[in-house]
Image (cartoon, rainbow, N blue to C red):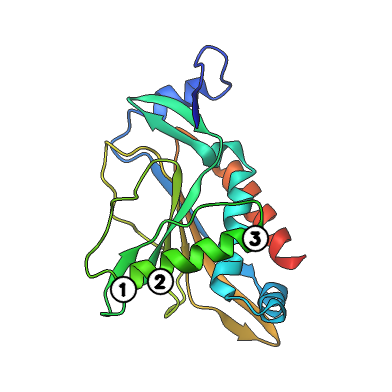
Amino acid sequence: MKQSIDLKTWPRASAFKHFVQYSDPYFGITTHIDCTEAYVRAKELGVSFFLYYFYLSLQAANEIPEFRCRIKDGKPVIYDTVNGSPTIMRDDGELGYAMLEYNTAFKTFLINAEKEIERVRAYPDLDTSKDCPETIYYSIMPWITFTSVKHPLDLPTTEGIPILTFGKMTEENGKKTMPLAVHAHHALMDGKHIAKFVESFQKKLSE
């Protein structure tokens, strides 16, 4: 469910009115995250490392209100919960879009996610039927590391959906790291909100 945000009382109203008019209002950062402990934990649990860190990132994003804000008919709204839509390699070697529904219970999330990924891998076309604003787009590039990312965006009609991009995990001196890029609509959040997300996500990975 979503709720309208009252521009008369929203502290971000001035920034929203300013940046929502931009032809390209998205900004982004690229950083590296330490996934050493998370990788070990996923192996201990016998679960997919990808789905483990995906869940933790979605959990961190849902805890930050700005990551649940979107734009509807030119006005800000906030959703109770947002899901995650990652790119998945299909059986034919092309990319498909999955919709992994967030659930506070990791086991429930895992069961549903595995079924959805299996469906997408077997589907012959690029299915966008589940696309919706109450999501976060994920781009998964496990083949390469990177220091910056540029995404295609449908501007200026975007709903303000954030994009998270993960790259190849590498290891040096026993420490596993992975590049992470975050792109967001500047009318809905600032760098401090992305920093808060990265900090929370890293904490979850290290617990």
Can residue 31 be seen here? The reply is: no
> Who's the residue at 27% across and 58% down the image?
127
Residue extending farthest to the bottom is: 173
Q: Which residue, given by chain and number where applicable, does mark 3 sit on? A: 106
Q: How many neighbours does mark 2 have within 10 angstroms: few (below 14), some (14-19), or many (20 or more)?
A: some
- Across and down, in percent, residue 50 comes to 54, 72
Asked whether the residues under the numbered discs 1 and 2 touch, taking CB atoms below 8 Å apart as contact, a structural biologist would say yes
Of marks 3 and 1, which one's residue comes earlier in the chain? 3
Image-quadrant location for residue 97: bottom left
Asked whether the residues under the numbered discs 3 and 2 touch, taking CB atoms below 8 Å apart as contact, a structural biologist would say no
Q: Which mark is residue 118?
A: 2
> Who's the residue at 26% across and 74% down the image?
94
Q: Which residue, given by chain and number where applicable, does mark 1 sit on? A: 122
Residue extending farthest to the top is: 8
Q: Quadrant of the C terminus?
A: bottom right
| Front residue (pair 78, 162) | 78
Amino acid type, callout 3: Phe
Q: How many neighbours does mark 3 have within 10 angstroms: few (below 14), some (14-19), or many (20 or more)?
A: some
